[in-house]
Amino acid sequence: MTALQVSHVSKSFPGVKALDDVSMTLAGGSVHALLGENGAGKSTLIKIMTGIHRADRGEITMDGRPTRFANPRQAAAGGLGVVHQERNLVTRFSVAENIMLDRLGSHSLSRVDYAVLAEEARHWLAQLDLDIDPMTPVSRLSVAQMQLVEIGKALSLKSRVLLLDEPTASLTPSEAQVLFRTLRKLRDEGVAIGFVSHKLEEVFEICDTVTVLRDGRNACDSAPLKALTRDDVVKMMIGRAERISRRAPRPQPAAAPFFELQNYSSAAGHEDISLWVRPGEILGLYGLVGAGRSELAKAVLGLASQTGGTIYVAGTPRRIGSVSEALSLGIGYVSEDRKGEGLVLLHSVLDNAGITLWEQLSTALGFLRDATVAARVGPVLKKLEVKTPSLDQTIGNLSGGNQQKVSVAKWIAAGVRLLIIDEPSVGIDIKTKAYLHDLIHELAEQGTAVLLITSDLTEMVDVADRIAVMDDHRIRGLVENDRNYERVSTAIMGFIHGRTAPAAQAG
Amino acid sequence: MTDTTTSPDIDARDELMPARRRSSRLLRLLLSNEFGLAVMIAIAFTAFATTLPGFTSPFSLFTIGRQIGIDTMIGLAMMAVIVTGGLDLSVGAIGVCAAMVFGWLAQSMGVPLALAVPAAILFGGLLGFINGYAVVRSGVHSFIITLASMSIFFGVMIFLSKAQSFNALPPEVTSLGKMRIFGKVSLLLVITLVVCVALSAFYRFTTLGRQMLATGANARAAELSGIRTGRIITACHMLAGALAALAGLMLTARTGAAVPSMAGHLGQDWLLPAFLAPVLGGTLLSGGRVSVAGTLLGAAFVTIMTSGLLLMRVGEFWILACLGLILLLAVLTDRLRQKMLRARGLI
Amino acid sequence: MSATVNRLFDNDWVGPALVCLIAIAGISWLQPSFLSSFNIFVLLSAIAVNMVVALGQLVIIALGQMNLALGAFGGLVAISFVAIMELYGVPPMAAVAIGLAIGTAAGAATGFVIARTGISAFIITLAALQIFKGINLGITEAQPFYGVPQVVKDFGNLAVIGPIPWLVVPMVIVSVGMWYLLNRLRIGRYILAVGGNPTAAELSGINVTGTTIWAFAISGGLAAIAGMMLVARLQIGQPTIGDDWLISSFAAPVIGGAVLAGGHVSVAGTFFGVVIIAIITQALVLFAIDPFVVQIVLGALILWAVGINRFREIRVARHNEAR
């Protein structure tokens, strides 16, 4: 019995096709895995199912009837429950109240009958084998228990389809087992469960069927998991290398590393990280969602405290306490969140491109004219072919590709010697993406050390010289890049999914 | 954003979209806030001038001009903090405290004006520093910090001064308040105009000014671009404190005395003009954009309206209600403006 | 032992209650007249009014917002209350009802504007403050109304029994009512849900606009009651009623453990917060210290209370993480 059917759904955003003719069948009484790399389209698909986006083509049917939810609230009422990665509970309220939050009373001045709420809640808690007093405040629960409460809430709304987005991200292995027991029970009762995760071991443990998305298309559609091996699945996720990289592998520069981490640990959870980048070298840092790569970059920049190890800049041990200090040491960071962290959208191109230079260019009395900034920044912007009618143009009006160019330009203009670039091509058109790759190579040729953080394997193979693989805040291994996509991607995935024993440090 | 996104945040505004054609400079000027205010001022002024006989008398113009000077300065003080997206409820308290310090120095200690005035302004800056430091270190929103500091500053001042006024100030003080430049324009207004020019230049031509605007527009991006946002925010509060002090001194010059109640209980009487002028003038409450000229025009509009209505014998208190309505309208407009900007993906 | 102590301090009101006890003990030891019948009467009168004021802000803090116009609501209702009795001979009970209606309506209107425009409550209530204050002063021309009926004057200045003033009666009714509303009635839970996690509230179908209007209407109603109580105590319709409510209306709930971001408040804690403030104010007078020092103390108390609340929140978060 099909609970939810996705049929030939396509969705485009300006310049990017997020989903192309995607289908998926969620049958009642099964646990269905939804797999795919970052950017494969999983999240867009879920947003379409819950009504946040509307599909351009194709349709979604529930129990055989076409449905289109206008918003997540409607989806919940219609039998489609979603439990997200982030918790969505009123922490000061009790478990019972959270579960029954939409059924507290008939009108504003009605009395809340806690006994009835507790009774209802107890029922659902029992379903989930969750042995807690329904009147316990949610704030006293563990994250795992909170998650189960959210599942209970979805169930109490008579969800016939339950979508779980990275459910084990914040759970210990034993807590995950408790969750799986519950999921199996629900499955046996006929609920259709969608399970989005990147942890293949878990997928193979709990799921019955799998849909793999790659580049917005089905790599497989609701295939029974029993017929597949782990390698099969990984291959489907990363695909064959249709693109043969046009770049030859680069020789390793001879100079001493410009930037090095030795046994570095941070308050953000990183442990014993060791890696280095030479001037003119491009070190890739690969990892999946939650691996801790962006956090590492930010921690190194001084945004999280260092709890162990040493940072070496140009051979000298340094303590970096702020981004300002990092900049003065010659380190720059292009954030993955271009609009939120990379740019000041309200301000002009000139202001954005020059922001890293203001301190440097200001006169003794603190004066700084636009012309001075333009003189330094103009040539860089021109070289990067940033398309803007003038430097005074509000940067928020530029296209995404041009915005990205500016967010890189400001560091080039500042003359950084190590550029950390975080997910440069997310949401960028193909042409600009190729341009950025060329740019990175050019920077390296001119002697800049580059740390490239990306979860796009093609990009990684195309650009990086060496690739450090990170998982769960630790370095798992190092891969030399000979531009052979199959070999490199398999090696990387091997480190991620635990096939290969962790190499001695990504040295 | 941390490493928790599961898909690229593609939004509907993306690449391949040509950059907007820049509307002609003239059109932008005409549609701007400042121009609109200028037009409204012209209309109001003409209306009052033609219907009220005493409105354009030299004395009336002088007093209106002088009040514009004072109200603008109050607005500039709040503007300095709004620029970083914060709030400063203690501008009134700081203004009064600085005025009282001035009074004490000038009257009780016999300090010459040339020293007492800068000392009072520096004192205002010091109080602003306390605010800024507390906001940055505690991470608590400036609303709460300045809510507390307004009562602390005011309370300490009252306690130390025993609620006495300084009304035997050196005569130069009152004469400064009465002084006319070119026989027509109040000295206080001239001072304010000079400060306005200086502030405009500050926000456009100095590093610190740019950093303040960047911090206000997007503190996270500013921080990640190497700006020390903590120091910037503290600097903003110090600037606000100094400007508030200057406003307090100007008020003292006008009334001829430094009185503890000159800004109402805890200084809260200044809150309305302090917000009204910048918001009417186009300084976004969310920060990152400033209009010094707009603040001046906003204060001018409010002062002209108030003076005209007063001359028409409309009760002072009804005017207060009117101003509240104007504040509401100004904020609704600010909101609409923010909505438009958000729709265009700029904030 | 420490676990029990910890659990005890999990309650918001224990800390403030202890401070009250210590303060009362200390002050009365230094100045025995502190516990005189007369003094207790005066204290309770002040506490009664201030508790209702604090509750008026409490309901908005629960929502995660702020109401700067609380005093203006109170002042406007106070003078209207006397005006209609003096000018139109309306009997006191009816006048109370009308006053309550005015306050509630003003609050609802404010809440409506906030909810529909999405503009911060800070600005809207700042504007409302000016508007209502202006109307107030426009009607009274800064002169008080003197025609307060004797029965009202008596209510505000006589005792029920011993040193307990009549004013305590409305305070108790209102306090219990608010506790009941916030803990047992759907609207109260909705207010706390919106304050605690607006997204979750919205996803569960809670009407945020309606809830906001309700909260502000209640706030206005409470301000109205407090204003009328003050008229009874002061025995005149003083236009300046409400001018000094701003700081203490925040201080008491915050001392009582309220979280300014919304979602968590404590009526009992607020009560002890009100008591602490009243005691300090009284003590300053008793020891002939400048009464304006109370402003300093209030400001400092807010900072201290906010600091403690943050500390407790961090402790709870760390405790949960460690699990």
Image (cartoon, grey):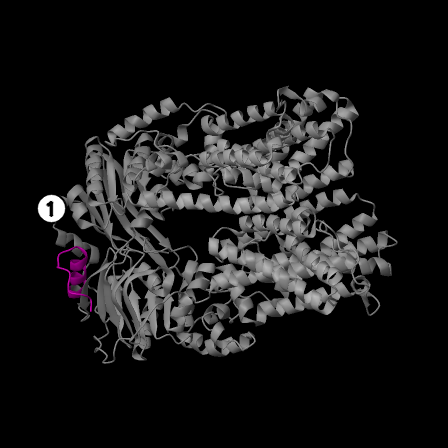
In the image, C296 versus A70, the foreground residue is C296
Other-residue count near label 1 (Cα within 10 Å), few / some / many at <14 / 14–19 / ≥20: few
- Residue C29: image location, x then y, percent: 56, 34
Is there any visible trace of residue B291 in the rendered image? no
Residue situated furthest right in the rendering: B53
Q: Is residue A122 above or below residue B144?
A: above
Q: Is residue C59 left or right of residue A52?
A: right
Is there any visible trace of residue A20 in the rendered image? yes
Q: Is residue A33 above or below residue C227?
A: below
- Residue A76: image location, x then y, percent: 36, 36
In the image, B282 versus B186, the foreground residue is B186
Q: Which residue is mark 1?
A: A227
Q: Chain of mark 1?
A: A
Q: Is residue C35 above or below residue A380?
A: above
Quadrant of the rendering where the C terminus of chain C is positioned: top left
Highlighted magenta segment, given as a residue range: A487-507
Q: Secondary structure at mark 1?
A: helix
